[in-house]
């Protein structure tokens, strides 16, 4: 491991990529603590201390690393870009024009990327306007906090805040694309990774100070067990063998090769967990913004506040299973895969090309998604239940969602580093 790390810094081009990536991540974290002009930073800090431990704000801070609640320059982080990417991906299924662009290769992908950028800017303007509107009124952005976060509420100041936060979102999007293009790993994923990781030291320190060394050790144990399970399942895949028939093109014989289609057990990644978490926080958000004390709001507070209530956990688990099937269905089309295989003379041994191949792939994918969805649900719930049992449920807010993201991004980045090291005749991280 140490020799591989040393090999990275001994290779000039790889060293530049790693340092470039680390430099942009450092700038991203710097922008996450620089306050937006017009914001009373001291009042914001007092409000954050007041709502500390609220699980609703834990989800809000998940992808921004605390930047959103501090109303910093990079307050929105990667959230608008992720939202825009998911929307474009969903629209590709229902809009023929986008589906055609997806099949055009690199030129079509460039156009879809441009559409995602435009949508990101639009979403950033809407979200920053909403955040600034909430911040103007005491007690709206931070429930129960009477502090005046925006002392000067003149139109020029408000417009400046919206412009600065929107520009910050565009800069973050540029950071992510530059890391992907000139650095190591997926840029947006690494920015999320850095945001989540930034909150862990303070949370672990709080648990150690409030609960003692024994509980702290048990929390570490739960986290390690979860990470081991995530690594094991994330690496698992079902390989569908594919044989390509030999064919004559001119005077040359092509084909005859054997390959496989890798179907991961967890085809959906962490997206179902994010969808389910976001959906379950809507009732809390509605109650928080409305300030209602009616029967329905009290019921929501009893069952959807801490994230450890039985009804919350059951609903969370079922939503994860639903979104796992939903996301896999829209991202993997067995008919298109079967058509592409037939076009290039490929077939699955024992399965006829065309429709029988599509039906077989759909059958395998359906059976594979079931244990994958159960795995996602269990991994997402175990930390909630485990940390609640240890009495640190409110101190360790991110749970399985953050661990899934961090392990997935870490594995992908390590694989990219290993492949580049192996291209230069180094052993890499794995022996």
Image (tube, grey):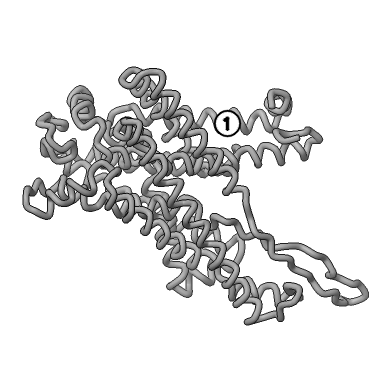
For the image, the number of numbered tags is 1
- Image quadrant holding the N terminus, namely top right
Give the percent coordinates (x, y) of residue 109. 55, 60
Give the percent coordinates (x, y) of residue 355. 63, 82
Does residue 190 appear anywhere in the picture? yes
- Image quadrant holding the C terminus, namely top right
Give the percent coordinates (x, y) of residue 8. 69, 28
Residue 323 location, quadrant:
bottom left
Does residue 168 appear anywhere in the picture? no
Tell which of 250 and 137 is nearer to you. 137
Task: Answer few, some or many: residues within 10 Å of disc 1's Cα (few below 14, many 20 plus, some between 14 and 19).
Answer: some
Residue 262 location, quadrant:
bottom right
Badge 1 is on which residue? 20
Among all residues in the image, which is located at the extreme right? 251
Give the percent coordinates (x, y) of residue 146. 9, 31
* 23 vs 240: above or below: above
Residue 357 location, quadrant:
bottom right
* 147 vs 180: above or below: above
In the picture, measured across the screen, residue 89 lies left or right of residue 287, that is right
Tell which of 147 and 21 is nearer to you. 147
Q: Residue sitting at 51 percent across and 36 percent down? A: 225
In the picture, measured across the screen, residue 71 lies left or right of residue 353, that is left
Tell which of 113 and 373 is nearer to you. 373
Q: Residue sitting at 52 percent across and 62 percent down? A: 369
In the picture, measured across the screen, residue 7 lies left or right of residue 324, that is right
Secondary structure type for disc 1: helix
Tell which of 4 and 97 is nearer to you. 4
Q: Residue sitting at 86 percent across and 70 percent down? A: 254
């Amino acid at each position: 491991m140490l020799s591989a790390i040393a090999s990275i810094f001994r290779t000039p081009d790889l060293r530049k990529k790693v340092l470039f990536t680390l430099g942009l991540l450092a700038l991203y974290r710097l922008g996450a603590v620089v306050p937006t002009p017009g914001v009373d930073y001291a009042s914001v800090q007092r409000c954050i201390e007041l709502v500390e431990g609220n699980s609703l704000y834990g989800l809000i801070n998940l992808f921004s690393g605390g930047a959103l609640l501090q109303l910093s320059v990079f307050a929105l982080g990667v959230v608008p870009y992720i939202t825009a990417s998911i929307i474009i991906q969903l629209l590709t299924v229902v809009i023929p024009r986008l589906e055609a662009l997806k099949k055009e290769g690199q030129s079509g992908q460039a156009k879809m990327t441009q559409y995602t950028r435009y949508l990101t800017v639009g979403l950033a303007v809407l979200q920053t306007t909403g955040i600034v509107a909430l911040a103007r009124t005491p007690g709206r952005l931070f429930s129960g906090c009477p502090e005046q976060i925006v002392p000067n509420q003149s139109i020029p100041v408000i417009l400046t805040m919206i412009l600065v936060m929107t520009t910050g979102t565009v800069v973050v999007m540029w950071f992510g694309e530059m890391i992907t293009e000139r650095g190591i790993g997926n840029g947006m994923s690494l920015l999320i990774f850095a945001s989540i990781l930034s909150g862990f030291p303070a949370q672990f320190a709080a648990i150690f100070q409030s609960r003692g060394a024994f509980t702290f050790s048990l929390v570490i144990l739960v986290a390690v067990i979860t990470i081991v399970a995530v690594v094991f399942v994330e690496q698992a895949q079902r390989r569908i063998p594919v044989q390509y028939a030999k064919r004559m093109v001119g005077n040359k014989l092509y084909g005859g090769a054997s390959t496989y289609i890798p179907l991961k057990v967890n085809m959906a990644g962490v997206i179902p967990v994010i969808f389910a978490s976001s959906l379950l926080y809507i009732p809390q958000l509605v109650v928080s913004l409305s300030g209602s004390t009616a029967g329905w709001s009290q019921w929501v507070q009893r069952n959807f506040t801490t994230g450890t209530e039985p009804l919350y956990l059951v609903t969370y688990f079922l939503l994860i299973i639903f979104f796992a099937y939903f996301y896999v269905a829209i991202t993997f089309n067995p008919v298109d895969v079967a058509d592409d295989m037939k076009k290039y003379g490929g077939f699955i041994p024992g399965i006829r090309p065309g429709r029988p191949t599509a039906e077989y792939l759909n059958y395998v994918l359906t059976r594979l998604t079931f244990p994958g969805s159960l795995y996602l649900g269990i991994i997402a719930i175990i930390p909630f239940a485990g940390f609640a049992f240890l009495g640190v449920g409110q101190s360790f807010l991110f749970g399985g969602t953050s661990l899934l993201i961090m392990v997935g991004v870490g594995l992908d980045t390590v694989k990219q580093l290993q492949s580049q090291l192996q291209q230069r005749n180094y052993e890499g991280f794995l022996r």
